Amino acid sequence: MRSLLTGALCAAALSSPALAHAVLERGEASPNQSYRAVVQIGHGCQGQPTTRVTVTVPEGVIAAKPMPKPGWTLATVKGPYARAYPHYHGELREGVREISWSGGSLPDDQFDEFVFQARVTDAFAPGETVYFPVRQDCPEGSHAWSEIPAAGQSARSLKSPAPGVRIVAAAQAAPTTAPAAVVKAGDLAIAQPWMRATPGGAKVAGGYLRITNGGSAPDRLVSAAIPLAGRGEVHEMSNTGGVMRMAPLEAGLTIKPGETVELKPGGYHLMFLDLKEPVKAGATVEGTLTFERAGTVPVRFAVGAIGAAGPGGTSAPAADGHHHH
């Protein structure tokens, strides 16, 4: 009886979309906003490695731009849209309809991400869901995560659900508040700690601030912490040959005497991992920063909108739509 029960539970778990091979990290997007799609591949095809990942860009999602991936060959298929869509400098009538990464080998017991950015148009209204079918190829066989639920049907009832993104109204700008007081810690002055809100299910969040060293000796930021995350790290993001790379600074971030270092999206930043719950826009999050000389310093992070460009809280209107940690 115990064996039968265990088998039934395993079968039920394997049929759940939560354990699907292909999911999207960010489960929400807004009309007329950029969307950074991170396709997560959790395991291969019955023990085989994944050698190709292909994403279909649905109608109503335009200006798709894939991120190259070291060790993989990137290819796109372009085609006409069903109608013209307003864009920054006129109208778009065609664009990338399919993206594939091939030639690599992702072992069955490893996890990886495949990234592209695009713009969700007003073809979708809040409350709707837009689906991005994904095909996963292996040396022998493949699997298409392409099933789309019918009206009133739950995606959980499907065996091979396509990754979906729920459309929500764009976050409204938070009321303007007085700037947070600068936190002093020895020779250091810490200004404007802030974070971006995260969608439900996200496991990482970025943190940003500005540090000025008014002393005569260098100090080093070695870690950060908030109650909502399992751990916090100091990261650096760089652009090498058009490829964005992010890596932890194992030795920490040095702040030289007389220097001001800004941690911001697209550069140095804090990365909070293993989130226990979403970070909500408009909230404040208590946290700590740990320095080599100044020790552990309490700070309070103001939370802006998802994809916010700065501590003001609203989403960035950048023409290329980039929102990095």
Image (tube, rainbow, N blue to C red):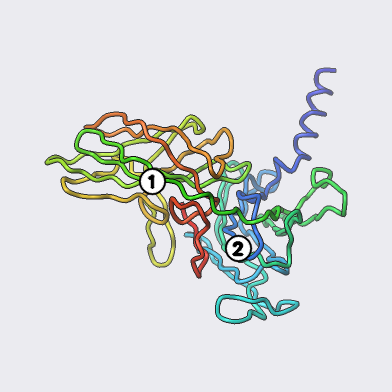
Q: Amino acid at mark 2?
A: Gln
Helix, strand, or loop for circle 1?
loop
Q: Which mark is residue 257?
A: none
Task: Report the Cα–Cα distance between label 1 and label 2.
Answer: 27 Å
Q: Earlier in the sequence, mark 1 or mark 2?
A: 2
Residue extending furthest top? 1
According to the image, label 2 marks what residue? 33
The residue sitting at 50% across, 33% down in the picture is 229
The residue sitting at 50% across, 68% down in the picture is 320
Q: Amino acid at mark 1?
A: Pro
Q: Position of residue 208 (x, y in %)?
A: 40, 46
Q: Nearer the viewer, mark 1 or mark 2?
A: 1
Q: Position of residue 277 (x, y in %)?
A: 58, 35
Front residue of this view, candidates 63 and 258: 258
The residue sitting at 58% across, 43% down in the picture is 202
Mark 1 Cα-neighbour bin, 10 Å: few <14, some 14–19, many ≥20: few
Q: Which mark is residue 179?
A: 1
Helix, strand, or loop for circle 2?
strand
